[in-house]
Image (cartoon, rainbow, N blue to C red):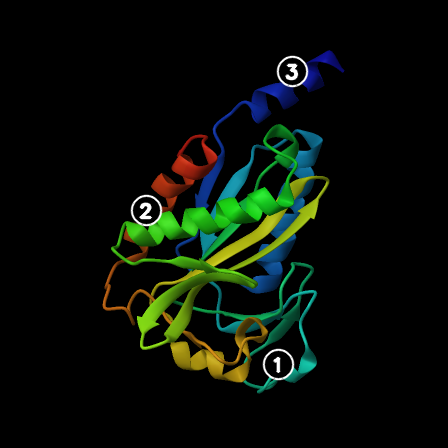
């Protein structure tokens, strides 16, 4: 028992694990791996992890999703998920960040955690000279397009189990924005979606990953290994 406790304490004091997948990761497999990692973190047998990846084109429905917001149900596969939020799109050119943190070792405050995720995205965008902004009553990060128009550039959807976080964020780097036509993104029809590429910022995914790592350390602390 004493050795098991020492192992858990050692893991919890370690720098968090950064995992980066270079090829498209099937959604269901990623969810299974993420869930297993959450259980391992809770058991004290694995370190916290941030997993950066891309999915094939698909739609996910959060716990607040309305069926009427699925405009084209046959366009891409649709996955019902336990994260908060409504419908969103995932696909190539979009960087997903699955974040598995132990809030018992940090701060047991879900609102503060979501705000930190927002800050993480805002700082990442700032490194590319893009001003990402919060909007009252709307989850995610927005870009002012001028003339009263604004578009969503990043989405947030979280789930908490045993005070371990999972799911996380998605940042539009250079996805095919026409793929959003099959849903009402996050239940908001009066605003558009955008990406770094649509804002005239052409960057590689490794450059985005590097910016995400730096901003994460600034907001959440911890290491940047891997």
Residue drawn where x is 65% and y is 58% of the image: 83
- In the rendered structure, which disc, 1 or 2, sits on the residue that comes first in sequence? 1
Q: Is residue 217 visible?
A: yes
Contact (Cβ within 8 Å) of mark 1 with mark 2? no
Q: Which residue is mark 1?
A: 69
Residue 38 position in % (x across, y down): 65, 42
Residue drawn where x is 62% and y is 35% of the image: 102
Q: Is the residue marked by circle 3 packed among few (<14), some (14-19), or many (20+) residues within 10 Å? A: few
- In the rendered structure, which disc, 3 or 1, sits on the residue that comes first in sequence? 3
Instruction: Say if 106 sits above or below 4 in the image.
Output: below
Q: Quadrant of residue 61?
A: bottom right
- In the rendered structure, which disc, 2 or 3, sits on the residue that comes first in sequence? 3
Q: Which residue is mark 3?
A: 6
Residue drawn where x is 57% and y is 43% of the image: 112
The local secondary structure at tag 2 comes to helix
Residue 24 position in % (x across, y down): 45, 62
Q: Quadrant of residue 66?
A: bottom right
Q: Is residue 24 visible?
A: no
Residue 135 position in % (x across, y down): 48, 61
From mark 2 to mark 3, how far is it between C-alphas? 34 Å
Quadrant location, the C terminus: top left
Residue drawn where x is 24% and y is 63% of the image: 201
Residue 188, numbered circle: none
Q: Is the residue marked by circle 1 packed among few (<14), some (14-19), or many (20+) residues within 10 Å? A: many
Q: Which residue is mark 2?
A: 211
Q: What is the residue that sits farthest to the right in this orientation?
A: 1
The local secondary structure at tag 3 comes to helix
From mark 3 to mark 1, how far is it between C-alphas? 49 Å
């Amino acid at each position: 028992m004493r050795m098991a406790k020492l192992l858990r304490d050692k893991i919890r004091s370690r720098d968090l694990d950064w995992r980066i997948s270079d090829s498209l990761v099937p959604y269901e497999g990623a969810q299974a791996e993420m869930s297993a990692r959450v259980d391992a973190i809770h058991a004290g047998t694995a370190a916290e992890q941030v997993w950066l990846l891309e999915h094939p084109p698909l739609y996910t429905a959060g716990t607040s999703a309305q069926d009427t917001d699925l405009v084209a149900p046959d366009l891409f596969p649709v996955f019902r998920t336990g994260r908060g939020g409504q419908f969103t799109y995932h696909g190539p050119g979009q960087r997903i960040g699955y974040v598995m943190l132990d809030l018992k070792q940090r701060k047991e405050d879900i609102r503060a955690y979501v705000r930190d995720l927002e800050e993480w995205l805002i700082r990442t965008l700032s490194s590319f000279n893009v001003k990402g902004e919060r909007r009252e009553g709307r989850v995610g990060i927005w870009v002012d397009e001028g003339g009263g128009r604004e578009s969503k550039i990043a989405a947030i959807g979280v789930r908490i189990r045993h005070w371990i976080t999972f799911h996380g964020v998605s940042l539009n780097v250079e996805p095919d924005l026409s793929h959003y036509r099959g849903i009402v993104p996050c239940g908001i029809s009066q605003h558009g979606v955008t990406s770094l590429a649509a804002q005239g910022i052409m960057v590689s995914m490794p450059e985005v990953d590097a910016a995400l790592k730096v901003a994460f350390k600034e907001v959440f602390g911890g290491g940047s290994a891997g």
